[in-house]
Image: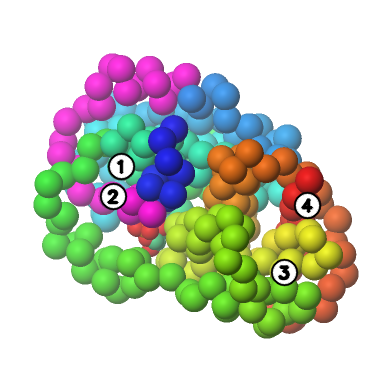
Amino acid sequence: MDNLAEIVMGRKSVRSFDGNPISDQHRKALEEYIKGISNPFGIPVEFVLLDAGEHGLSSPVLTGEQLYVTGKVEKKPYADVAFGYSFERLVLYAWSLGIGTTWIGGTMKRELFEAAAGVKPGEMMPCVSPLGYPAKKKSVREVMMRKGIGADSRIPAEKLFFREQWGQPLTQADEMAEILELVRWAPSAVNKQPWRILLKDGVYHFYEKKDKGYVSEATGDLQKIDVGIALCHFLMGLEEQGMQAEVTVRDPGLEIPNDAEYIVSVAIK
Ligand SMILES: Cc1cc2nc3c(=O)[nH]c(=O)nc-3n(C[C@H](O)[C@H](O)[C@H](O)COP(=O)(O)O)c2cc1C
């Protein structure tokens, strides 16, 4: 993949496609990349590519899409976080090839996608995404939607990243600041950015700042998926800088607000 910052900052959800199928070369590249995707939780995510026409798949927010990717994961603790991490790896890789995606957890006929993907009891298919080349012009609906969600802005860093104690801004002017900027620009459900990071004793602890209405049987907790996406950007940023990290799930028991939940910790070695 090219420069990670260019990919992360350049990526936008794409909801208007040019109607062309993706090239054989790109399809092969995606299939190869998928085979190598793993996540720090060791929870396998199975990707399924589905032809939209063949399976009668569509989404009211999309136009011109020909192909979808869905992901299936066994329902268990951390399945949603793992799903977010693994699926985002594919999203970023697709963008590096010039292929647009949109995380879709709500705006679709879920039963049709689940049947086409062959979701079994005990599994969930939290989100899907179209895969295709962006149209030259966005649909009016897409433009309105982006405006409505405020998709082109993000919460300022000082409200997301803390040092020593919750609420105390983490201000750093080194390569970590660049990596945190990649985290800040991650995509999230309704652009809520529910991740928070608290740096304590050299360890970056990730939390979910929970809102109501994001948990269901079919999707798990969409905001935990968002934290998995943020973690993906963080670890890919460290990887690119050649920094080694150790990922653990061990709640340090720090003081946090009632609507926050501990998710994962990253120690830089
Ligand atoms: C877990 C998740 C679920 C999402 N579900 C939908 C959806 O159902 N429909 C939709 O149009 N966009 C959906 N999105 C896309 C977000 O709205 C989008 O990522 C966010 O507004 C930021 O815009 P950007 O991706 O262009 O940076 C979802 C994103 C995530 C991460």
The answer to the question of whether label 2 and label 4 lie on touching residues, with beta carbons closer than 8 A, is: no
- Which mark is in front, 3 or 2? 3
Residue annotated with mark 3: 198
Q: CA distance from mark 3 to mark 2?
A: 32 Å
Q: Amino acid at mark 2?
A: Val
- Which of pointers 2 and 1 lies earlier in the amino acid sequence? 2
Residue 100 numbered tag:
1
Q: CA distance from mark 3 to mark 1?
A: 32 Å
Q: Amino acid at mark 3?
A: Leu
Residue 232's x, y, as percent? 58, 47
Residue annotated with mark 2: 14
The answer to the question of whether label 2 and label 1 lie on touching residues, with beta carbons closer than 8 A, is: yes
- Whether 98 is among the magenta residues is no
Q: Which residues are magenta?
A: 9-32
Secondary structure under badge 1? Answer: loop
Residue 109's x, y, as percent? 37, 49
The answer to the question of whether label 4 and label 1 lie on touching residues, with beta carbons closer than 8 A, is: no
